[in-house]
Amino acid sequence: MSLISIAWKSIRQRGLASALTALSVALGVMMMVVVLVISGAVDAAFNQRTIAYDLIVGHQRGGELALVLSAVYRVQPASENLPYLYYLQLREDRRVVSAVPLAFGDVTQEGHFPLVGTTDEYFRNDYTPGRKFRIRGKRMSHHFDAIIGAEVARRNNWDIGSQFTIVHGGADGTHVHDEKFTVVAVMERTGTPNDRTVFVNIEGFYAIAGHETPLNEVEQRLKNFYASDPERLKTALAQIAAAREQEAAEAAHDHHHHHAIPDAAKEVTAILIRTRPDALFDPINLSAELREGYQAMAVNPMKPIRQIMNQLVGSVKQGLMVLTAMIILVSGVSIFVSIYNSMSDRRREIGIMRALGARRTSVFGIILMESVVLCVGGGLLGWLAGHGLAVAAAPYVTARTGLLLDPWTVDTLEFVLFPVLLLLASAVGFLPAMTAYRTDVADALSG
């Protein structure tokens, strides 16, 4: 009979105690696996794969982190907008392959999902490097067309043809706009903030009552922004003057119908930039030029995203990993106590084994094997339970947070887990095994 068979019979004789000690290891390992699966999903959401753009351009006020939180994650409003003319200017830059405007400001009345005004170019680009949007429906061709994320469709029970209204000023706003938007397409789930976003035609966004900025205010902003570029400022102010004359003429004739907003009076919250893939220094040069010449900044999204990971998510992950490591260590101690306390009851059993010809090393190996089976076996059960729990929780977590969990993704730390458990089993089983090794046959049989 092999050592592991004898060890297993011994474990079964102490079934309750053995099950409880193995369960403690399993719970610790299960918790560690769940932490690794969730942190892996969070890491995938908060890194460069979240957005397939080289730069995010926004106003200098508010800082880099605020710009990324606004443009990528839509969790914080931008402090100030950029002129729409500046977006047109960047679009013509030879270093820019794609420039996509984003305009924020309102939320849906139902569900309070953020509204983003943009163009169809947003959906022609990858949402993460190498992954394109998969959309059921058609492109935005009319002012009040909308494309909605998968989570918006699920939560609000919307589909193609659904109509909705929006609330001015965010979720705390009370003014409901009269304009109604129509869903023309629904995106498949991406595991990014796009799932919880409603995209509308940017021209429709500007056409919403209350979204226009007073011309005097626009004029002052343009003067500040283009202070170092008199030629562009002259062109912008000419458009503002023409728009002011049109307003005066309509007021004189008592006309209040909607008229086209001049480009100089439009604003965007952020601009997503893709530069030439074969020119590595284009993002750096472009970013430096923007800071020097205009009241704008171009942010590489990787830097603030990693800042979020290191300062917030990373600290939480480390704390949970330390906690689970302590749970596993305490479980190892419980295995040691269980086996060591059983040694006094097993002295006669060990003596009989020795009298029947078992060597000291065999007895030593049996006790050590019991520790390994309890520790590694409990760890294996915990590993399976952890991933099984992730499988069961994945739909709920995705629905509540938008994170796409891959329950069977194996973190590199999991490859280290079982060798560590084996070492822990050897350490906690060594002293009881040595006690069995030193047991005197005569004393054991006479006791």
Image (tube, helix red, strand yellow):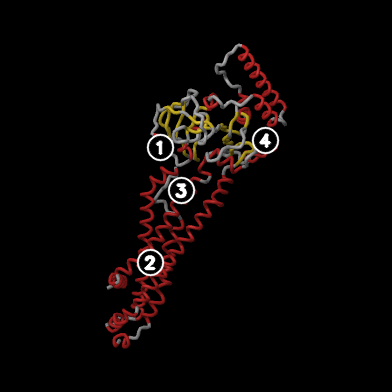
Task: Give SS at disc 3.
Answer: helix
Q: Which residue is mark 4?
A: 295
Q: What's under tag 2, amino acid-wise?
A: Cys
The residue nearer to you, when weighing 87 against 27, is 27
Residue at the extreme top of the image, as rendered: 253
Can you give x and y, in whole percent of width and height, for residue 209 in the image? 54, 24
Q: Which mark is residue 155?
A: 1
Q: What's under tag 1, amino acid-wise?
A: Arg
Which is nearer the N-term, disc 4 or disc 3?
3
Q: Quadrant of the C terminus?
A: bottom left
Residues at marks 1 and 2, CA–CA distance in whole angstroms: 44 Å
Q: What's under tag 4, amino acid-wise?
A: Gln
Q: Residues within 10 Å of mark 1 (few under 14, many from 20)?
A: few
**Residue beneath the point at 34% across and 76% down:** 342
100 sits to left or right of 153:
right
Q: What's under tag 3, amino acid-wise?
A: Ala
Residues at marks 2 and 3, CA–CA distance in whole angstroms: 28 Å
Closer to the camera: disc 1 or disc 4?
1
The residue nearer to you, when weighing 57 against 98, is 57
Q: Quadrant of the N terminus?
A: bottom left
Task: Give SS at disc 2.
Answer: helix
11 sits to left or right of 119:
left
Residues at marks 2 and 4, CA–CA distance in whole angstroms: 61 Å
Q: Which residue is mark 2?
A: 375
Q: Which residue is mark 3?
A: 41
Which is nearer the N-term, disc 1 or disc 2?
1
Residues at marks 1 and 4, CA–CA distance in whole angstroms: 39 Å
Q: Residues within 10 Å of mark 2 (few under 14, many from 20)?
A: many
